[in-house]
Amino acid sequence: MSAAWTERASAMVRGLGPVDPRVADALRRVPRDRFVPASLSAEAYEDTPLPLGGAGSTISAPHMVAILLEWAELTPGLRVLELGSGSGYLAAVAAELVGPSGRVDGVEIDEELADRSTRVLTDLGYAGRVSIHAADGRPGWPAAAPYNRIIVSFATPEIFPEWRDQLTTPGVLVAPVGPPSGQVLRRLRHGAAGDRLEDGPECIFVRLVRPVARPK
């Protein structure tokens, strides 16, 4: 690993303030500059979202990635689904948290972005541990369900029943719920005795946008 990017990643984490130690360590292990356009590499370790092009997708700010992962309570061996995986950065950090015995599936509606993130993840050695599927995340990813954790990385007006149905029992789903102008991070704990909802910080995520189809 390059000493230059590891120091930048460490400085980024130090600037985030209090972060769960396991999440902080996972953030330090993933080169965020590989997941942004080359023209933005100088800004890759700033605590800000960055545009990915295409249909208006962004890579979330590092502090928001940390919050999502803390709220998802990832531990080794879990199966994780990220809906709206974008650049693949959060999926890579999640893979560090669930370890070699875990598994991460990402669903990204922008085919070009899904292809790009797959190439980056493969180059970084995540093949076999992280899979990105070019598809609409609205229905989830029932082909590989159930999942111990589901993380929604786009603004959603509600937690849809089909997502809940793809959780294990017990299981946890984290999503930014609300209108495009602003959401509240919401955690659904799915258990044998029923579901429990918890509200977290306010946030702003890009809503799910259907990109223009690429010419064949």
Image: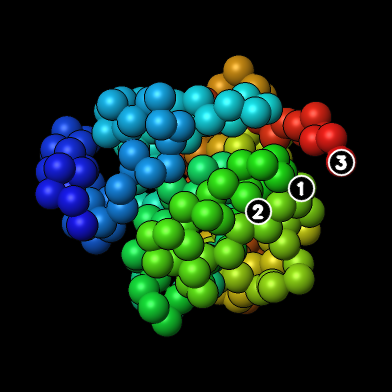
Quarter of the figure that contains the C terminus: top right
Q: Position of residue 46 (x, y in %)?
A: 27, 28
Judge the density around disc 1: few (<14), some (14-19), many (≥20) Cα neighbours within 10 Å. Answer: some
Residue 48 against residue 192 in the figure, above or below: above
Q: Mark 1 points at which residue?
A: 136
The disc, 1 or 2, on the residue closer to the chain's N-terminal end is 2
Q: CA gap, disc 1 to disc 2?
A: 7 Å
Q: Are marks 3 and 1 in contact (CB under 8 Å)?
A: no
Q: Give how far apart the Cα atoms at labels 2 and 3 are.
A: 22 Å
| Residue at the (51%, 43%) spot, across then down | 87
Q: Position of residue 79 (x, y in %)?
A: 53, 72
Along the line of sight, the residue nearer the viewer: 68 or 206: 206
- In the picture, measured across the screen, residue 107 lies left or right of residue 17, that is right
Disc number placed over residue 216 in the picture, else none: 3
Query: At x 12% / y 49%, what residue is drawn?
Result: 3
Percent across and percent down for residue 48 are 36, 26
**Do the CB atoms of the residues marked 1 and 2 lie less than 8 Å apart?**
yes
Q: Mark 2 points at which residue?
A: 107
- Ranked by sequence position, the earlier of labels 2 and 3 is 2
Left or right: where 169 falls relative to 158: left
Residue 195 placement (x, y as % from top left): 62, 61
**Which is closer to the viewer, label 2 or label 3?**
3
Quarter of the image with the N terminus is bottom left
Neighbourhood count class around disc 3 (C-alpha, 10 Å): few under 14, some 14–19, many 20 upward: few
Q: Look at label 2 and name its amino acid.
A: Val
Secondary structure type for disc 3: loop
Residue 167 seen in render: yes
